[in-house]
Image (tube, grey):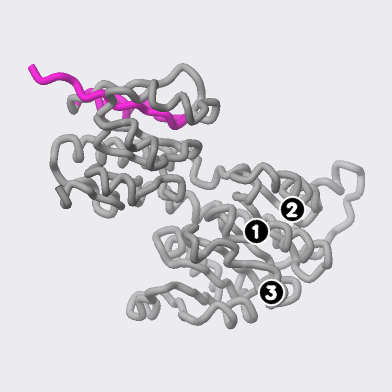
Amino acid sequence: MAALRRVVVTPPNFDAAALDYLRAHGCEPVLPEKPEAQFTPEEWPALLAGADGWIIGPAPHVTRDLVAALPACRVFARRGVGYERLDTNAIAEAGRVAAIATGGNDASVADAAVGLMLAVGRRMREQQNAMLSGDWSIRVSTDLYRMTVGIIGMGRSGRALAQRLRGFESKLLAVTPRPDLAWGETAGVAFTDLAALLRESDYVSIHAPLTPATRRLIGAAELAAMKPGAILINTARGGLVDDRALLETLRSGHLGGAGLDVFEGESDPALKPIAQELLALPNVVATPHSAASTRQGLARTNMIIARAVVAVLDGTQPPEGCVIADGRRSL
């Protein structure tokens, strides 16, 4: 009988169905006794010693040194789609595979983006807080219906958002490195450049990956270029927006508000006070990087990444789009 493949599973909320899938396909899932975020970098090699695969949550940085310290680990699999904390070059150069859970959470993120648009535009936080203090006066708010929405990034979540906004009869603008003109015509999306999108949009929603090229894509100049009263939504990654510049722009009254699921302070403790100041503003509605964390979205991503890990260990084809670095081809 073949030995079970040891797969360490560190993300929170990894459900029984995905664990059962691993067990049914010759894997022994190992769950640590403490949360992923409580591990120090020095603790990972001992926990992962001898592991054939690692299913990774949002906390760890998979560095070149860590890859080298785990010679048995054949697949580094991120439960989610962001992989800026994985050194994919090091993984590929070592002959291993890096994978993500493509297609699992785009619907959840798109739903959250719409929710933030409605919450900020309709001033729900402001109105409820006023009511709690006894002030039931009406505060005039902003529609999403037939407004112009600019979408930065047309991956799965950007496309899912566009699909949902058609029900609001929104005018849709998009910026993406490789526009699919045929899809855009069918979906009612007009591709443009960033300057035009910022100038014309009533809502701007960010759905781009965080890379060296996109870091602080939206800074002070871009915020100043937005339409007065416009609303910024970020459900993608902290680091795409210069949070200090956003704070200053919101305080100036130039923008109508912001809906934020992600902050620069998540990965840079020095910027955590800026996040706290943003949270204190009455026209900011925020969530703690939870846009993808619905019960249904987590179940989808858990199963997709479990299937990807099994496929890599079996030498078969993982689900489409899940492999982002494959060093097996160079060996």
Between circles 3 and 1, the one closer to the viewer is: 3
Residue 118 is marked as 1
Secondary structure, mark 1, is helix
- State how far apart marks 1 and 2 are (Cα): 8 Å
Q: Earlier in the sequence, mark 3 or mark 1?
A: 1
Q: Position of residue 229 (x, y in %)?
A: 75, 71
Task: Identify the residue under disc 3.
Answer: 221
Q: Give residue 38's position: percent from left, percent from top.
A: 55, 26
Q: Position of residue 151 (x, y in %)?
A: 52, 69
Q: Nearer the viewer, residue 17 or 3?
A: 3
Which image quadrant is residue 148 in? bottom right
Would you say the residues marked 1 and 2 are in contact, meaning their CB atoms lie under 8 Å apart? yes
- What's the distance in space between the residues labelled 3 and 2, CA to CA? 28 Å
Residue sitting at x 60%, y 63%:
216
Which residue is depicted at the point 18% across and 25% down?
26
The numbered dot on residue 39 is none
List the residue tagged with mark 2. Answer: 124
Q: Upstream in the sequence, badge 1 or badge 2? A: 1
Q: Which residues are magenta?
A: 1-24
Q: Amino acid at mark 1?
A: Leu
The stretch drawn in magenta includes residue 223: no
Quadrant including the N terminus? top left
Secondary structure beneath label 3? helix
Q: Which residue is pictured at 24% across the width and 30% down the height?
A: 72
Specify which label sits upstream in the sequence, 3 or 2: 2
